[in-house]
Amino acid sequence: MKLLEENIEKDKSGFVTLLLNEPEDMWHIYNLIQKGDQLKASTVRQIVIESSTGSTSKSMVHLTLTIAVKKTHFDVQLSQLRVSGRNISKNNHVRIGAHHTIDLFINSTLTLIKEEWDVISLERIKEACDITKTADVAAVVLQEGLANICLITYTMTIVRQRIEVNIQKKRKGFANGYEDSLKKFYQKVIDAIIHHVNFDIVKVLIIASPGFVKDDLYTYMMNEEIKVLLENKSKILLIHCSSGHKHSLNEVLKEPGVRNLLSLTKYKTEIKALQRFYDMLDKDSERAFYGIKSIIFACENNAIETLLLSDKLFRSNDIETRKKYIKLVEDVRAKGGKVLIYSSLHNSGEQLNQLTGVAAILNFPLKEPNSDEDKESSEKDDDDESVEWSTSSSDESSEDNF
């Protein structure tokens, strides 16, 4: 992401103009745009033209509109963000107050206007515009007949391709069928790696599996003598995992060898902190709190060493809810605590969301307040999520543009 212009007043109102360069930028802007914000961007609208004879025709026109945001919808696989709202700018083709949906893609330029830019939003822009933060890890988790090709950045874990091949059973006298189906599977995995992994950026390619599947795939890859794979074989790391499903990445990223390779990345800190929280919860539970009521109690007692928060908490459409979590961040920092924001599209963020999205490691043991409400704090925010995981984009609100 590139920051083209910024104008934030002392009262925290103002605007930023941004250029979206890559898929991860779409996730950042999805987190930045809130209901009530104003978005200015280039868009397309179908208009009806009436001739002097009374006949009508339809035409698509390109124009720049500013809308007051009502809702957003993000398609992860297509890296497409749809922002719907009412037009608030004068235009020859769109009346003020008319509904319109702006589609944002990679290479889009936009201006985002807010009445108040909070510290979380400003930090996200700074982080997104840091060119040192790149998608530098790829992973293949597989078992016989199943493979998931993943790209891992400091905010996202995305399955770029899922491969399933029926592997014939080993039977006496019919070994060729088994070997042929296995070779077909390995070739599909290799083709997917070549297609999805950019070795100019990727620092390490993790291949993980139960048993010797990873080793057999690696041997097959090297025997094929594909130039790009031979040139980058030093980046390939073979790791054991329990299955070929995406969730196995959680155990892979905890491996010491993987942690060492990720030593310069942001998500190593987050993964390590989350694992430390789980260890504390198991061995010294009075120093590991989760749930908003318990966390606020710990903050009031100056007990928080590290605060762990899911970014989905800041996407709530309820302004007071967002302000509550922003105040928590500011209070923890003011008292000397460390704050880590986890992406809900990263494996570590998915785990944290299972713990209400907010947790903390404490400096000292503290008796947790008794409350049944304490572990249910994030349920309200679940209704605010609008993320599309399928490869097809939603048709929701498409009529707004006509």
Image (tube, helix red, strand yellow):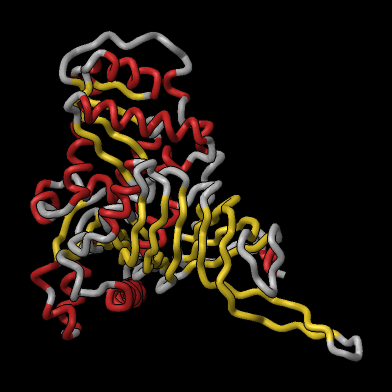
Q: Where is residue 81 drawn, in percent x and y?
A: 50, 62
Q: Where is residue 16 drawn, in percent x and y?
A: 38, 58
Query: In screen coordinates, is 342 left or right of 104?
Result: left
255 or 334, which is in the foreground?
Answer: 334
Q: What's the residue at 25%, 27% (across, down)?
A: 332
Quadrant location, the N terminus: bottom left
Q: Where is residue 218 drawn, in percent x and y?
A: 18, 70
The number of numbered discs placed on residues in the rendered structure image is 0
Q: Where is residue 69 drawn, in percent x and y?
A: 57, 53
136 or 248, which is in the foreground?
Answer: 136
Query: In screen coordinates, is 158 left or right of 302?
Result: right
Query: In screen coordinates, is 396 left or right of 172?
Result: right
Quarter of the image where one finds residue 85: bottom right
Q: Can you name the residue that lies furthest to the front here?
A: 10
Quarter of the image where one finds residue 359: top left
Quarter of the image where one finds residue 174: bottom left
207 or 361, which is in the foreground?
Answer: 361
Question: Residue 133: in sight, yes or no?
Answer: yes
Quadrant location, the C terminus: bottom right
Q: What's the residue at 36%, 34% (across, down)?
A: 326
**From what the image shows, is residue 229 above or below residue 378?**
below
Question: Residue 173: in sight, yes or no?
Answer: no
Q: What's the residue at 55%, 54% (across, down)?
A: 72
Query: In screen coordinates, is 369 left or right of 306?
Result: right
Q: What's the residue at 24%, 11% (across, down)?
A: 366
Q: Can you name the residue that lies furthest to the right here?
A: 53
